[in-house]
Image: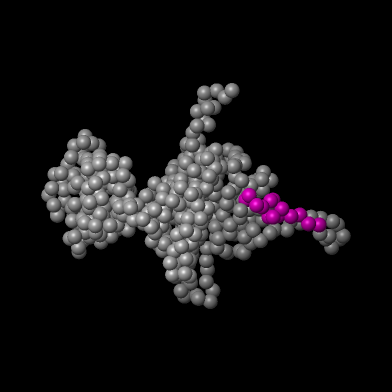
Amino acid sequence: MPDAEQRQEAELKYQERLNISVASIARVKEILKNDIKDTIIAWSKGRDVDKQCYHIIGPAGVGKTQICFQIADELTEEIFGAHNQKNEQDPKEFETMMIKAPVLSRDDFIIPFPVEDEKGFNDFRMLYSDFVPKVAGSYGVFVIDEFSRGDHQLQQLLWQVQNEYAVHTFPFPKGWFVFSIDNPDDSEYSMDTLEDAAGLRRQLHLYVEVNAHDFLAYAMKQEFHPLVIEFIQTFPEYLYDFQSQKIGAVYANPASYEKLSDHLWKMEIARGSIDYEEIEIKGAGLLNVNMTKIFLEFARDKKHIRPMDVFHNYPSVKRKVEKLVNDNDSSKLSELMVGFCTYLATSMPMFEKDPRKLQNCLDFLLIMPIDTAALFISQIDGFDRLSEQFKYMTKLHLAMMDKDRTYKKKFYDPIVKAGEGKIK
């Protein structure tokens, strides 16, 4: 029987066991990209600093793999953009080479083959595969996807890649950086983790959390289907279905919503409309049956109060909001408030030149019960002080104070009082 200490350790989450930081995927991407740039600049100024191997950990489908490609693309522009404009015939780039550890073996990287030298002696030399970057002076990111699901012999070789930036006696070009990507070593994932103190010491480990704001920023930049964007803005808690994942069912996640968006766009472009019966079947295979029903109810039946309608046309949903308040439906009101804040922080709709938009926000917030109203302030307080979201939400908050004195008296002051100074 395991003792109390063993049971306590087993109950800890993977990031807690490793005792590492947790950050949003946008923040992790920024940290890693900046570190690579800092390294290259230090080299250019005569300081031969060591490269860092990066270990990105997070739930499946959260976007870990995607940010590696984004980092390479952005580094191409930020480091080589000026060069490429002047040398269109000889462009430079940050390449991306990705390997999938679960489907490869050690022999896919390196194979000894017999050779005979000029004196007739038999010998062996190593044949290196296309998975090994070889071009001198090149730059890139070498991505090991799902390292901990590779077999042990492959993991042994990949430890050398991560620790020494080499395969056998062949070193990677200096401009190549190594990323290792893993799901957390929890019960939801099938892992074959091979760890040692040296490996843990030489890697920079970062845990990526699920973050609706990051997903929505990416979704809007990539022009996801509006229904997907509006759905997650309204229900950010549905972005990742951890409960379904734990029981081994199909589960909603950022990657599956991106695929759903593609299906919606394909139908609209090719057929001129969305076949919701077909989406019900496809969506079930991407999100699961229950989540797809919620999505389709949102998309077709218009029963839910959309946060964008609160901002742009509050009179059209006012009666529905008032009914929730009169029914004291705190669950629905909290859901609506979080969705409203998520819409504001991700879409950042203009309000300065249209007093009606500001009035819509005021009319909505001023009828909220204090516990629901507190969510608006706590959402603002939860943003990084230097983020665009915090700046936007604070600007809106101050604009409402300036427009209507009752906002401070009936909305903000009671929240501060109820929080006994905890909410600033």
Q: Position of residue 391 (x, y in %)?
A: 27, 54
Task: Indicate the quadrant containing the C terminus: top left, top right, bottom left or bottom right.
Answer: top left
Q: Specify whether residue 135 is painted magenta.
A: no
Does residue 107 appear left or right of residue 336 in this picture? right
| Residue in the picture at 67% in, 44% down | 152
Q: Which of 234 and 388 is in front in this view?
A: 234
| Residue in the picture at 52% in, 27% down | 7
Does residue 320 appear left or right of residue 177 in this picture? left
Residue 355 picture quarter: bottom left
| Residue in the picture at 54% in, 57% down | 141
Residue at the extreme left of the image, as rendered: 405
Vertical relation: 87 (above or below) 230: below
Q: Position of residue 359 (x, y in %)?
A: 18, 56
Q: Nearer the viewer, residue 9 or 118?
A: 9
Q: Nearer the viewer, residue 121 or 246?
A: 246
Name the colouring of the figure: one colour
Q: What stretch is highlighted in magenta?
A: 101-114
Q: Where is residue 309 in the image (x, y as percent from the top left)?
A: 28, 57
Say if residue 66 shows up in the picture. Answer: no
Vertical relation: 272 (above or below) 326: below
